[in-house]
Image (tube, grey):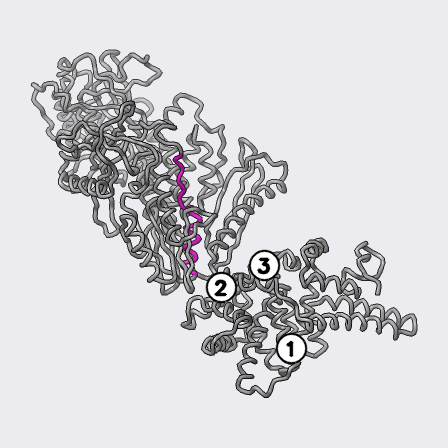
């Protein structure tokens, strides 16, 4: 044992000449192991003085303990063993008053489990060893501590045997010699096994600093009476009064410092603070006109109530004493006292998404707390309650309280509060989001406000602090509010914001520390993964024997899972899978399952600083989804896992067992993709409701293009452009003379027809604008957005220059410029408002449009402009086309154009941003500057022809059934272009050759 404990080799052993040392196999064993034996000379014990002095010390202490307890001499061995146990845990003079056990083990020694030798003890009897009417405990006498296992040793005098147990209540005031004073009918102590669980024992297998010290702390929770310091007691001890019973002492020692009832609050050392807290609560209730005193109607029953006391820790470290009057809602009857009770709360995904917006948009983040929130709800049923204890009105003791408003404890209280708050928010102009009914939004000219509600906690987000303060005043006027200022903490999550770097962190490090402390894992050895690869958990590892069930009944498995679940739901997606796996065994957890839970706790110990960090890089929403195949050993079901990020930070995640057994990996992944798709639809819908880029008004302005009549000259221009392409292809074929020439011309004709549905590259090549080809070689939606922004910039820049030289304007040039503007806005309308007509971009166009607007918004903010100047810029451009604007407005638009055209970079933005953002803003600025290098007349001629090609490309790639549906409604411009192309035989799908039947769409010329 010495070699095992110390990892050192025993070299020498000194002893007397006892037969147990020199005879038998002991001396042979030492010789075989190379251990030298040193024996004292017979009759001279002075040569081994240290051991001989310890023998005397042990004998004296054992004698004193045995005599004090009144135990017979047959227990001398137990007394000596206990004496040695205590000496090893007491200060030693030769060791400079250090503890021998501490020196030996290198661990801190604990004393809370030490008991008086020979005292009376009430040992719990297992349920399988007694009937329902038998006593739940039996009287035994404490004779020592466990050796190889945890627990205590007791003398069962009735059955004349020594037993071991740990579920015990000690009475250290009564010794073995005083057993006659103990009444035979022991009060039955109904103690649950879970009350005696000691987490030191449960963590000993994985905690490096556990082990021997756990044995010393094994019954720290079983110390049900105040330890007595005196070693010797009078032999005239009498039976203690009932008020000193162990059960009462246990309850008094575990109350946590908060009174359980009104009487305890008055007797507490902080009674004055509790009285003040109760008075504040009553003042709030009476001021809110929560009830009126009346006689109890016949046939009605009055609900009871109680005072609930809590000590709350504030952000500044101070303590706040809070008393709350709570109705005993369990006395209510469904259908009589209440009907519906559901009340929504804001989703965690919503909170994280909005906090991501705060970081990205640099918004203000404020917090409010509603005082006595549930008291504001109006009741719809007639409810009566007895008067609160301590505040019964004198002379009206026989009256009861008829409730006008809801109270804490009522089943319908949360719902009534939410309905009252929801009605108020609608009255002041806020809109409730359909995606989350606890998120409210209100838009202003240049700002917006978002309010999130979680029962009585509120987060307010906005770009204008004055409007936020105005909202606070409105709320405080209607409800009793506590303004917490800038948000620091919400639902146990710490909000750490660094405005200088534009970051916002959401951390639960303090909560995780409390969880680790609660389960005695704060000294655990960290691990690097949430769930070790060696864990193969299944229901086969659940307890099978009574001993295993008894052990696991003491394990706080469900409590640990609940604590981990809250961390996972809030800020720790990294443990989602691990928590999901261990939560499958809640009904019958086994030792392996508990080991896995402790592994997760150890992982949290090593990752306390892990948190969600919103960097404000962008508002791009991305999702990742995957599934395993038959990963669950018991059911062979697969696991769905997905995560969605906003600007690179996780805002929504899950790891759930699928509801069906899939037959292949493909099916499992389809099921996972379906679940992820649902979440994606919800997130996109929520983002659209929030209107994070301020696009709704802009889209409304774009919507008007749907009903604008196409100018006749523009129709003629489009017709001529398409007809010219058709004639060019025919002329190529007619000029062919030889067969070889005809084949070559036929190939050129085919190419001409396909080019006609190109994206502008044919026109740019024809006019030798090779420096602009890069703009049409990108994806179609990217190309369209770039040309749209570049057209706007060139349009207003030329208009500004023409105001200085009004004579230098050609009518034909004005027409072409106007047509470019018209087609530019029409194509943008199709991209954003009619994505089904733009099948060529497969839906990516809307995402690119949103990212471009978001980047424009940031650009103008950096330029010290108004927050929504890009939105104003686009709105003002479109208003100019219809109603005209003042000179100052045009000057402001020109200023915005100048800022964008002043962007000077030779590095393409995609080379810097990569795939983080789909914005094309600065690419468009580069294109506009390249276009402005051309002659003005040539510029607008080329741009007008490019826009016709972009239009024809979209028409040729839209499905025929989509065009047919539009024809039934009157038709879109793009549909008529499609028919015109069919008439001329243009476009890839209209080739005149053998092949698909769709060639029949061609109209004979």
The residue nearer to you, when weighing 944 against 224, is 944
Q: Please, what is the dominant secondary structure of the magenta stretch?
A: helix
Q: Is residue 22 above or below residue 470?
A: above
Secondary structure under badge 2?
helix
Q: Which residues are magenta?
A: 340-360
315 part of magenta stretch: no
Residue at which label 2 appears: 854
Counting from the top left corner in percent of width and height, residue 62 is at 16, 24
Q: Residues within 10 Å of mark 3 (few under 14, many from 20)?
A: some
Q: Are marks 3 and 2 in contact (CB under 8 Å)?
A: no
Residue at which label 3 appears: 833
Counting from the top left corner in percent of width and height, residue 367 is at 32, 53
Q: Earlier in the sequence, mark 1 or mark 3?
A: 1
- The structure residue drawn at horizontal position 35% and vertical position 44%, both measured from the top left corner, is 420
Give the distance between the C-alpha atoms of the residues marked 1 and 3, in whole angstroms.
26 Å
- Report the quarter where the N terminus lies: top left
Location of residue 988 by image quarter: bottom right
The reply, left or right, for residue 977 in relation to residue 179 is right
- Report the quarter where the C terminus lies: bottom right
Residue at which label 1 appears: 815
The reply, left or right, for residue 177 in relation to residue 725 is left
Q: Earlier in the sequence, mark 1 or mark 2?
A: 1
Counting from the top left corner in percent of width and height, residue 274 is at 17, 39
């Amino acid at each position: 044992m010495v070699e095992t404990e110390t990892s050192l080799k025993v070299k020498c052993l000194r002893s007397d000449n006892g037969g147990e040392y020199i005879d038998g196999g002991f001396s042979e064993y030492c010789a075989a192991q190379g251990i030298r034996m040193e024996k004292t000379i017979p009759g001279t014990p002075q040569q081994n003085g240290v051991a001989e002095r310890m023998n005397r010390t042990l004998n004296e202490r054992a004698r004193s303990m045995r005599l004090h307890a009144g135990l017979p001499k047959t227990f001398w061995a137990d007394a000596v063993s206990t004496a040695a146990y205590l000496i090893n845990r007491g200060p030693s003079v030769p060791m400079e008053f250090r503890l021998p056990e501490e020196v030996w083990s290198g661990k801190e020694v604990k004393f809370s489990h030490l008991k008086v030798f020979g005292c009376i003890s009430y040992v719990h009897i297992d349920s399988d060893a007694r009937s329902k009417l038998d006593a739940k405990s039996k009287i035994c006498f404490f004779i020592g501590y466990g050796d190889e296992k945890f627990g205590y040793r007791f003398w069962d005098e009735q059955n004349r045997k020594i037993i071991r147990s740990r579920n015990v209540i000690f009475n250290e005031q009564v010794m073995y010699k005083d057993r006659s004073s103990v009444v035979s009918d022991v009060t039955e102590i109904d103690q649950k096994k879970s009350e005696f669980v000691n987490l030191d024992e449960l963590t000993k297998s994985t905690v490096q600093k556990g082990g021997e010290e756990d044995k010393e702390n094994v019954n720290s929770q079983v110390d049900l009476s105040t330890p007595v310091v005196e070693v010797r007691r009078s032999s005239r001890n009498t039976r203690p009064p009932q008020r000193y019973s162990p059960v009462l002492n246990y309850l008094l020692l575990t109350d946590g410092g908060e009174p359980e009832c009104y009487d305890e609050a008055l007797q507490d050392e902080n009674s004055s603070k509790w009285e003040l807290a109760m008075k504040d609560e009553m003042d709030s209730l009476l001021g809110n006109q929560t009830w009126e005193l009346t006689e109890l109607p016949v046939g009605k029953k009055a609900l009871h109530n109680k005072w609930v006391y809590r000590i709350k820790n504030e952000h500044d470290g101070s303590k706040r004493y809070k008393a709350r009057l709570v109705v005993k809602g369990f006395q209510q009857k469904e259908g009589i006292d209440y009907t519906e009770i559901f009340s929504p709360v804001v989703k965690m995904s919503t909170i994280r998404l909005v906090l991501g917006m705060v970081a990205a948009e640099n918004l203000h983040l404020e917090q409010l707390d509603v005082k006595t929130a549930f008291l504001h709800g109006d009741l719809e049923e007639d409810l009566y309650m007895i008067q609160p204890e301590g505040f019964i009105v004198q002379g009206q003791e026989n009256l009861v309280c008829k409730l006008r408003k809801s109270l804490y404890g009522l089943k319908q209280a949360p719902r009534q509060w939410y309905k009252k708050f929801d009605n108020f928010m609608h009255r002041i102009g806020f809109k409730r989001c359909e995606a989350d009914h606890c998120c409210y939004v209100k838009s202003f000219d240049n700002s917006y406000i978002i309010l999130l509600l979680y029962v009585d906690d509120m987060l307010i987000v906005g770009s204008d602090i004055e409007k936020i303060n105005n909202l606070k005043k409105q709320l405080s006027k209607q409800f009793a509010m506590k303004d917490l200022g800038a948000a620091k903490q919400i639902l146990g999550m710490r909000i750490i914001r660094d405005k200088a770097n534009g970051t916002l962190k959401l951390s639960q490090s303090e909560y995780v520390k409390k969880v680790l402390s609660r389960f005695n894992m704060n000294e655990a050895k960290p691990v690097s993964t949430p769930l070790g690869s060696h864990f193969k958990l299944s229901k086969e590892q659940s307890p099978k024997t009574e001993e295993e069930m008894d052990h696991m009944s003491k394990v706080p498995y469900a409590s640990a899972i609940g604590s981990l679940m809250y961390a996972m739901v809030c800020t720790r997606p990294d443990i989602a899978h691990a928590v999901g796996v261990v939560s499958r065994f809640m009904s019958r957890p086994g030792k392996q399952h508990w080991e896995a839970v402790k592994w997760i706790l150890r992982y949290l110990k090593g990752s306390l600083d892990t948190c969600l960090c919103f960097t404000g890089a962008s508002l791009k929403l991305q999702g990742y989804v995957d599934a395993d195949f038959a990963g669950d050993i018991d059911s062979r079901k697969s696991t769905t896992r997905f995560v969605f990020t906003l600007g690179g930070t996780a805002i929504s995640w899950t790891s759930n067992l699928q509801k069906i057994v899939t037959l292949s990996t493909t099916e499992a992944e389809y099921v996972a993709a379906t679940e992820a798709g649902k979440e994606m639809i919800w997130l996109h819908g929520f983002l659209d409701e929030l209107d994070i880029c301020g696009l709704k008004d802009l889209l409304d302005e774009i919507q008007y293009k749907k009903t604008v009549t196409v100018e006749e000259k523009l129709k003629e221009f489009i017709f001529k452009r398409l007809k010219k392409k058709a004639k060019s292809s025919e002329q190529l074929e007619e000029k062919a003379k030889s067969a070889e020439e005809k084949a070559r011309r036929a190939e050129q004709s085919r190419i001409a027809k396909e080019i006609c549905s190109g994206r502008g590259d044919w026109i740019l090549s024809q006019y030798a604008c090779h420096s602009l080809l890069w703009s049409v070689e990108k994806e179609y939606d990217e190309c369209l957005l770039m040309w749209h922004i570049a057209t706007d910039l060139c349009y207003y820049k030329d208009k500004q220059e023409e105001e200085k030289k009004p004579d230098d304007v050609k009518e034909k040039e004005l027409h072409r410029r106007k047509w470019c503007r018209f087609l530019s806005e029409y194509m943008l309308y199709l991209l954003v408002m009619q994505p089904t007509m733009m099948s060529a971009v497969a839906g990516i166009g809307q995402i690119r449009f949103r990212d471009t607007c978001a980047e424009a918004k940031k650009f103008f903010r950096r330029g010290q402009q108004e927050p929504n100047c890009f939105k104003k810029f686009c709105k003002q451009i479109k208003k100019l086309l219809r109603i005209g604007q003042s000179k100052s407005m045009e000057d402001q638009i020109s200023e915005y154009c100048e800022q964008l055209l002043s962007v000077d970079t030779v590095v393409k933005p995609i080379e810097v941003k990569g795939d983080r953002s789909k914005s094309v803003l600065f690419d468009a600025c580069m294109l506009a500057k390249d276009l402005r290098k051309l002659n003005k007349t040539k510029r607008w001629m080329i741009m007008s022809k490019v826009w016709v090609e972009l239009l024809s490309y979209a028409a040729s790639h839209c499905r025929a059934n989509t065009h047919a549906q539009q024809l039934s409604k009157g038709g879109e411009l793009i549909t008529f272009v499609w028919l015109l192309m069919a008439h001329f035989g243009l476009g890839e799908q209209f080739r005149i050759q053998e092949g698909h039947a769709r060639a029949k769409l061609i109209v004979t010329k």
